[in-house]
Image (spheres, rainbow, N blue to C red):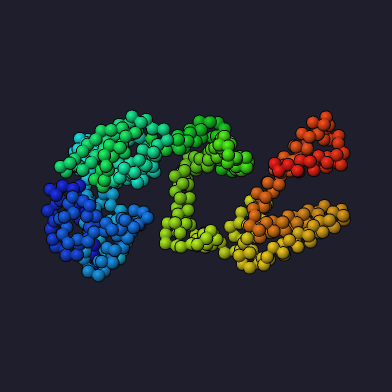
Amino acid sequence: MPTIVVVGLGPGNDALVTSGTLEVIRNIEVRFLRTAQHPSAHLVQGATSFDHLYDNADSFDEVYLSIAQSLIEAAHTHGTVLYAVPGSPLILERTVAHLRQQSEVDVEIHPAVSFLDDTWRALQIDPVEHNVRLIDGHEFARAAAGYSGPMLVAHTHANWVLSNIKLSIDDPDPDTSVILVHHVGLDDEKIVHTTWANMDKEIDADHLTSLYIPQLDTPVAEEMVKFHELARTLREQCPWDKEQTHHSLVRYLLEETYEVVDAISHLDPNDASTDTDLIEELGDLLYQVEFHAAIAEEEGRFTMADVARTVHDKLVARHPHIFADVEVSSSSDVEKNWEAIKSAEKPERKGIFDGVVGASPSLLLATKVQQRAARVGFDWPDINGPLSKIGEEATEVAHAAAAGDPESTMVEIGDLLFAVVNVARHLDIDPESALRTAVAKFRHRVESVEGLATQQGKKMKEMTLSELDELWEVVKQYPTH
């Protein structure tokens, strides 16, 4: 079977490259280097470097996948190839991780001295006794969440990476002590003691730079961690919270959702103060999610991490045009892909209306049902059909009302509303938003009529319909009404 033999070139000092590694290099003719920008790269003579890939790719993940695929193809062509990487093949080497996950070729890994060994020497600490956590600088905001240190942050290969790390904490102490570990084991080794505020200003960071954080006063994502712990505490200690179940909380989940919608409707793009209500209502809604997760965690069923991971993975899978090689040209293409992926995820849903939530608000439910029917061709070809249907249904409402039949009238009213939703769908208008806008406009106009009546020393309930209509026409003339 084709084979890729992986060796590590140590932290940069030739003396730390093992004799076993040198022998492996001598015995394999076809050689590759992840990067020639490493002090010990010259030991792999005649090797092909992948440095050129870094200049053209949109992301490091794209580079790593491309390298792995190139190595696999070379192994199929030559039988056995050598792949040399900086440090140790098993320490923060994404390309090696990709190779280990595939089954097309054998991957033979030889141990090597990593940058960690010399880093502990330079810092004069025992990582086990100090309980140091090793973190990738590109994943700092996620990997360090809720943790205050100590941490050794690798892959801080540029000052912009250090800047991103610095900005990942909302309210840090700028005087927090950190240590930059630069070119350990080489003649120009630097161990720079500095502060959180200055970490990206002290040196020109490169691929041989790491960051050591002894202790953080404010852990990364502290607010989310505190929020999660609060939900647990309330569940354990508050008598009311203790009594709640998933089912008992449904009403509050719905209430908080509608309050978020209300806050959004009052947003003013020119007035930042209107964000305050939305921040508060989003927080209330977020607490409902945390509450359900706290109940499930208590029962040993799932946790908030499971919720976040599930939606993360689902969104990645449903956006192959972002995270894979699918190409799209419009938002409609995105929607088609989304529906196709959903169908593949849930093959048990075979009926036209499977998956439509019956408890949805009626306007949304009507829209969803019509969309599903349209997918199988059961739809008007254009807006003329639904528009004519409105007139037809309105006539039937009038006949039912004239006949004094309440049940029949209710049915016909439902048909009329369903026809209006159909018109909105054909115009690509959300009927819920349209109706909310109409209600808000009506409410504002009635309040304006009331204001005009008060100015005239009158009360609305004592005025005639003709008098009210005159005031209505007045307020309609103002564009804000």
Residue 261 located left or right of residue 98: right
Count of all numbered marks drawn on residues in the image: 0
To which quarter of the image does residue 422 belong? bottom right
Q: Indicate the position of residue 120 as horizontal and vertical percent values.
A: 21, 39
To which quarter of the image does residue 409 belong? bottom right
Residue 86 located left or right of residue 273: left
Q: Is residue 428 above or below residue 439?
A: below
Tell me the quarter of the image containing the C terminus: top right
To which quarter of the image does residue 440 belong? top right
Q: Is residue 186 above or below residue 372?
A: above
Q: Indicate the position of residue 383 as horizontal and vertical percent values.
A: 69, 63
Camera sees residue 390: yes
Camera sees residue 111: no
Q: Residue at x 35, y 57 (%)?
A: 57
The residue closer to the viewer here, 321 or 330, is 330
Q: Residue furthest bottom?
A: 77
Tell me the quarter of the image containing the N terminus: bottom left
Q: Which residue is drawn at 16% across and 43% down?
A: 186
The residue closer to the viewer here, 378 or 173, is 173
The residue closer to the viewer here, 236 or 85, is 85
Q: Residue at x 63, y 57 (%)?
A: 428
Q: Indicate the position of residue 287 as horizontal and vertical percent values.
A: 53, 38
Q: Indicate the position of residue 172 as horizontal and vertical percent values.
A: 38, 32
Q: Residue at x 73, y 61 (%)?
A: 387
